[in-house]
Amino acid sequence: MAAVNAHLAAMYESYLFSEVDRRVQAYRAENPQKRLLRLGIGDVSRPLAPAVVDALVGAAEEMGQAQSFRGYGPTRGYPFLLQAIIEREYEPVGVKLSQEDVFVSDGAKTDMAALQELFAPDAVAAVCDPVYPVYTDANRMAGRKIVLLPCSQEDGFCPPLPRERVDFLYLCSPNNPTGAALTYAQAARFVDYALENGVALLFDAAYSAYISESGRPKSIFEIQGAKEVAVETGSFSKSAGFTGLRCAWTVVPRENRFGLNALWARRAAAKMNGVSYPVQRAAQAALETPGWEQSRENVRYYMENAKILLGAAEKAGFCTWGGKDAPYLWVKCPDGMSGWEWFDVLLQNKGMICTPGEGFGSCGKGFVRFSAFASREETQEAAARLSEG
Ligand SMILES: *Cc1c(COP(=O)(O)O)cnc(C)c1O
Protein backbone atom coordinates (compact mmCIF):
# COMPACT_ATOMS: atom_id res chain seq x y z
CA MET A 1 0.00 0.00 0.00
CA ALA A 2 1.32 3.44 -0.89
CA ALA A 3 1.58 5.53 2.25
CA VAL A 4 -0.56 8.64 1.79
CA ASN A 5 -0.36 11.94 3.66
CA ALA A 6 -2.05 11.03 6.94
CA HIS A 7 -2.55 14.72 7.85
CA LEU A 8 -4.47 15.24 4.65
CA ALA A 9 -6.44 12.04 5.08
CA ALA A 10 -7.41 13.11 8.61
CA MET A 11 -8.71 16.52 7.54
CA TYR A 12 -12.41 16.82 7.90
CA GLU A 13 -14.16 17.53 4.66
CA SER A 14 -14.79 21.21 4.13
CA TYR A 15 -18.47 20.62 4.44
CA LEU A 16 -19.60 24.23 4.66
CA PHE A 17 -20.49 24.89 1.05
CA SER A 18 -21.71 21.38 0.33
CA GLU A 19 -24.00 21.55 3.36
CA VAL A 20 -25.25 25.00 2.27
CA ASP A 21 -25.94 23.51 -1.18
CA ARG A 22 -27.75 20.54 0.29
CA ARG A 23 -30.09 22.73 2.35
CA VAL A 24 -30.69 25.09 -0.57
CA GLN A 25 -31.54 22.19 -2.91
CA ALA A 26 -34.00 20.82 -0.35
CA TYR A 27 -35.64 24.24 -0.08
CA ARG A 28 -35.85 24.56 -3.86
CA ALA A 29 -37.49 21.17 -4.18
CA GLU A 30 -40.16 22.19 -1.69
CA ASN A 31 -40.62 25.76 -2.95
CA PRO A 32 -40.03 25.61 -6.71
CA GLN A 33 -41.88 28.89 -7.33
CA LYS A 34 -40.03 31.00 -4.73
CA ARG A 35 -37.19 33.28 -5.72
CA LEU A 36 -33.94 32.70 -3.86
CA LEU A 37 -31.62 35.58 -3.02
CA ARG A 38 -27.99 34.46 -2.98
CA LEU A 39 -26.04 36.46 -0.44
CA GLY A 40 -23.77 33.56 0.34
CA ILE A 41 -21.46 33.90 -2.61
CA GLY A 42 -17.81 34.85 -2.23
CA ASP A 43 -17.42 35.37 -5.96
CA VAL A 44 -17.79 38.50 -8.06
CA SER A 45 -20.71 38.83 -10.47
CA ARG A 46 -19.81 41.81 -12.67
CA PRO A 47 -18.05 41.20 -16.00
CA LEU A 48 -14.45 42.16 -16.71
CA ALA A 49 -13.69 45.77 -17.62
CA PRO A 50 -13.70 46.42 -21.40
CA ALA A 51 -10.02 47.49 -21.36
CA VAL A 52 -9.10 44.20 -19.65
CA VAL A 53 -10.92 42.20 -22.32
CA ASP A 54 -9.19 44.21 -25.08
CA ALA A 55 -5.79 43.44 -23.56
CA LEU A 56 -6.65 39.77 -23.26
CA VAL A 57 -7.75 39.55 -26.89
CA GLY A 58 -4.77 41.57 -28.11
CA ALA A 59 -2.34 39.31 -26.26
CA ALA A 60 -4.07 36.18 -27.55
CA GLU A 61 -3.62 37.50 -31.09
CA GLU A 62 0.06 38.19 -30.43
CA MET A 63 0.42 34.57 -29.43
CA GLY A 64 -0.91 33.53 -32.83
CA GLN A 65 1.76 35.40 -34.81
CA ALA A 66 5.28 34.05 -35.29
CA GLN A 67 6.95 37.41 -34.64
CA SER A 68 5.08 38.11 -31.40
CA PHE A 69 4.59 34.57 -30.08
CA ARG A 70 5.87 33.98 -26.52
CA GLY A 71 6.66 30.72 -24.80
CA TYR A 72 7.70 30.45 -21.16
CA GLY A 73 7.92 33.86 -19.55
CA PRO A 74 9.92 34.87 -16.48
CA THR A 75 8.83 32.68 -13.54
CA ARG A 76 8.20 35.67 -11.31
CA GLY A 77 6.18 37.60 -13.90
CA TYR A 78 6.85 39.95 -16.82
CA PRO A 79 8.55 43.24 -15.90
CA PHE A 80 5.65 45.22 -17.41
CA LEU A 81 3.28 43.73 -14.81
CA LEU A 82 5.71 43.90 -11.87
CA GLN A 83 6.21 47.60 -12.63
CA ALA A 84 2.48 48.28 -13.00
CA ILE A 85 1.84 46.64 -9.60
CA ILE A 86 4.54 48.72 -7.95
CA GLU A 87 3.35 51.98 -9.49
CA ARG A 88 -0.38 51.50 -9.01
CA GLU A 89 -0.67 49.56 -5.79
CA TYR A 90 2.30 50.70 -3.73
CA GLU A 91 3.70 54.09 -4.82
CA PRO A 92 0.44 55.94 -4.08
CA VAL A 93 0.58 54.78 -0.45
CA GLY A 94 4.24 55.71 -0.11
CA VAL A 95 5.66 52.17 -0.31
CA LYS A 96 8.81 51.88 -2.43
CA LEU A 97 9.49 48.48 -3.94
CA SER A 98 11.76 47.12 -6.62
CA GLN A 99 10.80 44.46 -9.16
CA GLU A 100 12.87 41.91 -7.24
CA ASP A 101 10.44 42.24 -4.33
CA VAL A 102 7.37 41.25 -6.37
CA PHE A 103 6.26 37.83 -7.65
CA VAL A 104 3.25 37.25 -9.91
CA SER A 105 1.17 34.10 -9.50
CA ASP A 106 -2.13 32.55 -10.53
CA GLY A 107 -3.89 33.37 -7.28
CA ALA A 108 -3.69 34.68 -3.75
CA LYS A 109 -5.09 31.40 -2.52
CA THR A 110 -2.24 29.53 -4.22
CA ASP A 111 0.34 31.82 -2.63
CA MET A 112 -1.27 31.88 0.78
CA ALA A 113 -1.30 28.07 0.72
CA ALA A 114 2.33 27.89 -0.42
CA LEU A 115 3.99 30.42 1.90
CA GLN A 116 4.12 27.91 4.76
CA GLU A 117 6.57 25.86 2.67
CA LEU A 118 9.22 28.46 3.48
CA PHE A 119 9.16 27.47 7.16
CA ALA A 120 10.45 24.46 9.04
CA PRO A 121 8.19 21.42 9.38
CA ASP A 122 8.03 21.98 13.13
CA ALA A 123 7.46 25.74 12.89
CA VAL A 124 4.26 26.95 14.55
CA ALA A 125 1.61 28.86 12.59
CA ALA A 126 -0.83 31.39 14.10
CA VAL A 127 -4.20 31.81 12.39
CA CYS A 128 -7.16 34.02 13.27
CA ASP A 129 -10.54 32.49 14.08
CA PRO A 130 -12.85 33.05 12.21
CA VAL A 131 -10.97 33.23 8.93
CA TYR A 132 -10.73 32.28 5.25
CA PRO A 133 -9.92 28.56 5.52
CA VAL A 134 -6.81 28.21 3.31
CA TYR A 135 -4.26 29.25 5.96
CA THR A 136 -5.41 26.60 8.39
CA ASP A 137 -5.88 23.92 5.76
CA ALA A 138 -2.43 24.37 4.23
CA ASN A 139 -0.73 24.04 7.60
CA ARG A 140 -2.89 21.16 8.65
CA MET A 141 -1.94 19.33 5.48
CA ALA A 142 1.71 19.90 6.33
CA GLY A 143 1.15 18.48 9.82
CA ARG A 144 1.99 21.73 11.57
CA LYS A 145 0.97 22.93 14.96
CA ILE A 146 -1.56 25.76 14.62
CA VAL A 147 -2.27 28.38 17.28
CA LEU A 148 -5.71 29.95 16.88
CA LEU A 149 -6.22 33.65 17.63
CA PRO A 150 -9.83 34.04 18.75
CA CYS A 151 -11.40 37.23 17.39
CA SER A 152 -14.33 38.62 19.32
CA GLN A 153 -16.96 41.27 18.85
CA GLU A 154 -15.60 43.13 21.90
CA ASP A 155 -12.39 43.79 19.93
CA GLY A 156 -14.22 44.53 16.69
CA PHE A 157 -12.79 41.23 15.42
CA CYS A 158 -9.22 42.48 15.54
CA PRO A 159 -7.13 39.42 16.47
CA PRO A 160 -5.22 39.27 19.77
CA LEU A 161 -1.45 38.72 19.81
CA PRO A 162 -0.46 35.07 20.35
CA ARG A 163 0.18 34.07 23.96
CA GLU A 164 2.69 31.42 23.01
CA ARG A 165 5.69 31.25 20.73
CA VAL A 166 4.78 31.12 17.02
CA ASP A 167 6.98 31.34 13.92
CA PHE A 168 4.60 32.88 11.43
CA LEU A 169 1.24 34.55 11.65
CA TYR A 170 -1.46 35.14 9.05
CA LEU A 171 -3.41 38.37 8.90
CA CYS A 172 -6.26 39.08 6.50
CA SER A 173 -7.26 42.73 6.27
CA PRO A 174 -9.86 43.71 5.17
CA ASN A 175 -11.09 40.45 6.57
CA ASN A 176 -13.06 37.66 5.02
CA PRO A 177 -15.51 36.90 6.68
CA THR A 178 -15.84 39.68 9.29
CA GLY A 179 -15.23 42.64 6.99
CA ALA A 180 -12.97 44.24 9.63
CA ALA A 181 -9.98 46.23 8.39
CA LEU A 182 -7.04 46.81 10.75
CA THR A 183 -6.35 50.41 11.70
CA TYR A 184 -2.81 51.77 11.46
CA ALA A 185 -2.42 51.31 15.21
CA GLN A 186 -3.65 47.72 15.11
CA ALA A 187 -1.41 46.85 12.16
CA ALA A 188 1.56 48.53 13.86
CA ARG A 189 0.95 46.45 16.98
CA PHE A 190 1.41 43.29 14.90
CA VAL A 191 4.48 44.62 13.10
CA ASP A 192 6.10 45.64 16.41
CA TYR A 193 5.28 42.27 17.90
CA ALA A 194 6.80 40.52 14.85
CA LEU A 195 9.95 42.67 14.99
CA GLU A 196 10.42 42.05 18.70
CA ASN A 197 9.74 38.34 18.62
CA GLY A 198 11.18 37.31 15.27
CA VAL A 199 7.84 36.28 13.84
CA ALA A 200 7.02 36.39 10.11
CA LEU A 201 3.73 38.09 9.15
CA LEU A 202 1.84 36.74 6.14
CA PHE A 203 -0.59 39.47 5.12
CA ASP A 204 -3.54 38.78 2.82
CA ALA A 205 -4.59 42.06 1.19
CA ALA A 206 -7.03 40.58 -1.34
CA TYR A 207 -9.67 43.17 -0.41
CA SER A 208 -7.47 46.27 -0.14
CA ALA A 209 -9.39 47.91 -3.02
CA TYR A 210 -12.48 47.98 -0.80
CA ILE A 211 -11.07 50.09 2.03
CA SER A 212 -13.14 53.25 2.32
CA GLU A 213 -12.69 54.35 5.92
CA SER A 214 -9.67 56.52 6.68
CA GLY A 215 -6.95 55.38 9.05
CA ARG A 216 -6.59 51.89 7.60
CA PRO A 217 -3.49 50.77 5.72
CA LYS A 218 -4.01 49.25 2.27
CA SER A 219 -0.63 47.58 2.54
CA ILE A 220 1.17 46.25 5.60
CA PHE A 221 4.31 47.91 4.19
CA GLU A 222 2.83 51.29 5.09
CA ILE A 223 3.82 50.36 8.64
CA GLN A 224 7.37 51.19 9.66
CA GLY A 225 9.61 48.16 9.89
CA ALA A 226 7.17 45.85 8.08
CA LYS A 227 9.55 45.15 5.19
CA GLU A 228 11.79 43.27 7.62
CA VAL A 229 9.15 40.82 8.80
CA ALA A 230 6.09 40.88 6.51
CA VAL A 231 5.10 39.28 3.24
CA GLU A 232 1.97 40.52 1.46
CA THR A 233 -0.29 38.95 -1.12
CA GLY A 234 -2.60 40.96 -3.37
CA SER A 235 -5.07 39.71 -5.95
CA PHE A 236 -6.86 40.85 -9.08
CA SER A 237 -9.78 38.58 -8.17
CA LYS A 238 -11.92 40.90 -6.07
CA SER A 239 -10.50 44.22 -7.30
CA ALA A 240 -10.84 43.55 -11.04
CA GLY A 241 -13.08 40.49 -11.35
CA PHE A 242 -10.27 38.01 -12.11
CA THR A 243 -11.72 35.08 -10.14
CA GLY A 244 -12.08 33.15 -13.40
CA LEU A 245 -9.01 34.60 -15.12
CA ARG A 246 -6.54 34.00 -12.22
CA CYS A 247 -3.81 36.49 -11.36
CA ALA A 248 -2.28 37.69 -8.10
CA TRP A 249 1.05 38.75 -6.64
CA THR A 250 3.11 38.38 -3.51
CA VAL A 251 5.56 40.97 -2.22
CA VAL A 252 8.53 39.50 -0.37
CA PRO A 253 10.90 42.42 0.24
CA ARG A 254 14.64 41.78 -0.11
CA GLU A 255 14.94 43.40 3.33
CA ASN A 256 13.11 40.41 4.87
CA ARG A 257 15.23 39.39 7.84
CA PHE A 258 14.41 35.69 7.58
CA GLY A 259 15.74 35.56 4.03
CA LEU A 260 12.29 34.80 2.65
CA ASN A 261 12.89 36.70 -0.60
CA ALA A 262 15.56 34.24 -1.76
CA LEU A 263 13.57 31.26 -0.48
CA TRP A 264 10.39 32.33 -2.26
CA ALA A 265 12.32 32.95 -5.49
CA ARG A 266 13.97 29.54 -5.20
CA ARG A 267 10.67 27.85 -4.51
CA ALA A 268 8.99 29.57 -7.46
CA ALA A 269 11.80 28.51 -9.78
CA ALA A 270 11.46 24.93 -8.57
CA LYS A 271 7.69 24.66 -8.71
CA MET A 272 6.19 26.97 -11.32
CA ASN A 273 6.59 28.33 -14.82
CA GLY A 274 4.78 31.58 -14.40
CA VAL A 275 1.36 32.90 -15.36
CA SER A 276 0.06 32.99 -18.93
CA TYR A 277 1.08 35.98 -21.04
CA PRO A 278 -2.48 37.06 -22.00
CA VAL A 279 -3.54 37.00 -18.34
CA GLN A 280 -0.57 39.14 -17.34
CA ARG A 281 -1.43 41.63 -20.09
CA ALA A 282 -5.02 41.67 -18.81
CA ALA A 283 -3.77 42.29 -15.27
CA GLN A 284 -1.59 45.14 -16.50
CA ALA A 285 -4.66 46.65 -18.20
CA ALA A 286 -6.58 46.41 -14.92
CA LEU A 287 -3.92 48.60 -13.30
CA GLU A 288 -3.60 51.19 -16.04
CA THR A 289 -5.98 53.81 -17.38
CA PRO A 290 -8.77 53.18 -18.39
CA GLY A 291 -8.98 49.60 -17.01
CA TRP A 292 -8.29 50.78 -13.49
CA GLU A 293 -11.19 53.25 -13.45
CA GLN A 294 -13.48 50.70 -15.12
CA SER A 295 -12.59 48.05 -12.52
CA ARG A 296 -13.05 50.51 -9.64
CA GLU A 297 -16.54 51.15 -10.95
CA ASN A 298 -17.34 47.51 -10.13
CA VAL A 299 -15.82 47.82 -6.65
CA ARG A 300 -18.06 50.86 -6.05
CA TYR A 301 -21.04 48.87 -7.28
CA TYR A 302 -20.42 46.12 -4.71
CA MET A 303 -19.80 48.64 -1.95
CA GLU A 304 -23.09 50.35 -2.74
CA ASN A 305 -24.68 46.91 -2.33
CA ALA A 306 -22.92 46.57 1.02
CA LYS A 307 -24.30 49.95 2.09
CA ILE A 308 -27.83 48.93 1.12
CA LEU A 309 -27.53 45.70 3.11
CA LEU A 310 -25.97 47.46 6.08
CA GLY A 311 -28.78 50.01 6.17
CA ALA A 312 -31.41 47.27 6.08
CA ALA A 313 -29.70 45.16 8.76
CA GLU A 314 -29.38 48.17 11.05
CA LYS A 315 -32.98 49.18 10.45
CA ALA A 316 -34.04 45.68 11.46
CA GLY A 317 -32.02 46.07 14.65
CA PHE A 318 -29.31 43.51 13.96
CA CYS A 319 -25.78 43.91 15.30
CA THR A 320 -23.49 44.23 12.30
CA TRP A 321 -19.81 44.59 11.46
CA GLY A 322 -18.02 45.08 8.16
CA GLY A 323 -19.65 46.36 4.98
CA LYS A 324 -17.49 49.51 4.95
CA ASP A 325 -14.04 48.28 3.97
CA ALA A 326 -15.01 44.90 2.54
CA PRO A 327 -17.84 43.44 0.47
CA TYR A 328 -19.03 41.41 3.45
CA LEU A 329 -21.36 42.06 6.35
CA TRP A 330 -20.85 40.05 9.50
CA VAL A 331 -24.08 39.90 11.44
CA LYS A 332 -24.83 38.57 14.88
CA CYS A 333 -27.65 36.04 14.88
CA PRO A 334 -30.71 37.21 16.82
CA ASP A 335 -32.13 35.38 19.83
CA GLY A 336 -28.94 33.44 20.55
CA MET A 337 -29.26 31.35 17.41
CA SER A 338 -26.24 29.62 15.91
CA GLY A 339 -25.18 30.51 12.39
CA TRP A 340 -26.74 27.36 11.00
CA GLU A 341 -30.00 27.99 12.87
CA TRP A 342 -30.34 31.52 11.52
CA PHE A 343 -29.28 30.29 8.09
CA ASP A 344 -32.30 27.95 8.14
CA VAL A 345 -34.66 30.68 9.35
CA LEU A 346 -33.49 33.12 6.66
CA LEU A 347 -33.80 30.45 4.00
CA GLN A 348 -37.25 29.23 5.05
CA ASN A 349 -38.83 32.57 5.93
CA LYS A 350 -37.13 34.97 3.54
CA GLY A 351 -35.70 32.84 0.75
CA MET A 352 -32.25 34.29 1.52
CA ILE A 353 -28.96 32.42 1.41
CA CYS A 354 -26.12 33.54 3.68
CA THR A 355 -23.01 31.77 5.02
CA PRO A 356 -23.05 30.43 8.58
CA GLY A 357 -20.16 31.86 10.62
CA GLU A 358 -19.20 28.44 11.98
CA GLY A 359 -17.84 27.63 8.53
CA PHE A 360 -14.94 30.01 9.17
CA GLY A 361 -13.96 28.69 12.59
CA SER A 362 -15.51 28.02 15.97
CA CYS A 363 -15.41 31.71 16.95
CA GLY A 364 -17.71 32.37 14.00
CA LYS A 365 -20.49 30.56 15.78
CA GLY A 366 -23.49 32.79 16.36
CA PHE A 367 -22.81 34.93 13.28
CA VAL A 368 -23.55 34.81 9.57
CA ARG A 369 -21.84 36.45 6.61
CA PHE A 370 -23.78 38.35 3.95
CA SER A 371 -22.00 39.01 0.68
CA ALA A 372 -22.39 42.21 -1.36
CA PHE A 373 -21.41 40.48 -4.62
CA ALA A 374 -24.97 39.83 -5.85
CA SER A 375 -26.71 42.06 -8.40
CA ARG A 376 -28.13 45.41 -7.29
CA GLU A 377 -31.66 44.23 -7.88
CA GLU A 378 -31.15 41.05 -5.88
CA THR A 379 -29.46 43.05 -3.11
CA GLN A 380 -32.34 45.52 -2.92
CA GLU A 381 -34.86 42.71 -2.69
CA ALA A 382 -32.77 41.09 0.07
CA ALA A 383 -32.57 44.43 1.91
CA ALA A 384 -36.34 44.81 1.71
CA ARG A 385 -36.91 41.32 3.11
CA LEU A 386 -34.27 41.85 5.79
CA SER A 387 -35.54 45.21 7.01
CA GLU A 388 -38.89 43.61 7.82
CA GLY A 389 -36.96 42.15 10.77
C1 LIG B 1 -11.22 35.64 -2.53
C2 LIG B 1 -10.05 35.69 -1.62
C3 LIG B 1 -8.75 35.59 -2.12
C4 LIG B 1 -8.53 35.54 -3.61
O1 LIG B 1 -7.81 34.50 -4.00
P1 LIG B 1 -7.46 34.26 -5.52
O2 LIG B 1 -6.84 32.92 -5.46
O3 LIG B 1 -6.51 35.34 -5.93
O4 LIG B 1 -8.73 34.28 -6.31
C5 LIG B 1 -7.68 35.63 -1.23
N1 LIG B 1 -7.88 35.81 0.09
C6 LIG B 1 -9.11 35.95 0.59
C7 LIG B 1 -9.27 36.20 2.03
C8 LIG B 1 -10.23 35.88 -0.25
O5 LIG B 1 -11.46 36.00 0.26
Image: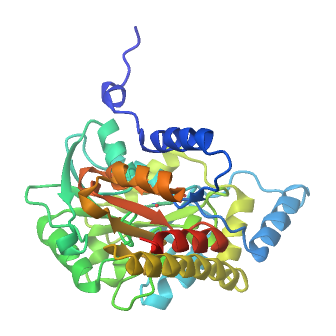
Q: Nearer the viewer, residue 190 or 375?
A: 375
Q: Residue at position x 35%, y 50% from top?
A: 341
**What is the quadrant of the N terminus in the image?**
top left
- Please determine whether, in this image, residue 138 is positioned above or below residue 149: above
Q: Left or right: 223 with respect to 272?
A: left
Q: Is residue 85 visible?
A: yes
Corner quadrant of residue 328: bottom left
Look at 34% across and 55% down and name the residue there: 357
Q: Quadrant of residue 58?
A: bottom right
Residue at the extreme top = 1
Residue at the spot 55% in from the left edge and 43% down from the top edge: 27
Q: On the rendered structure, is 273 left or right of 268?
A: right
- Quadrant in the picture for residue 313: bottom left
Relative depth, front residue between 253 and 61 = 61
Give the percent coordinates (x, y) of residue 290. Answer: 73, 85
The quadrant in which the C terminus is found is bottom left
Q: Position of residue 287 (x, y in %)?
A: 64, 78
Indicate the position of residue 64 as horizontal and vertical percent values. Answer: 89, 55
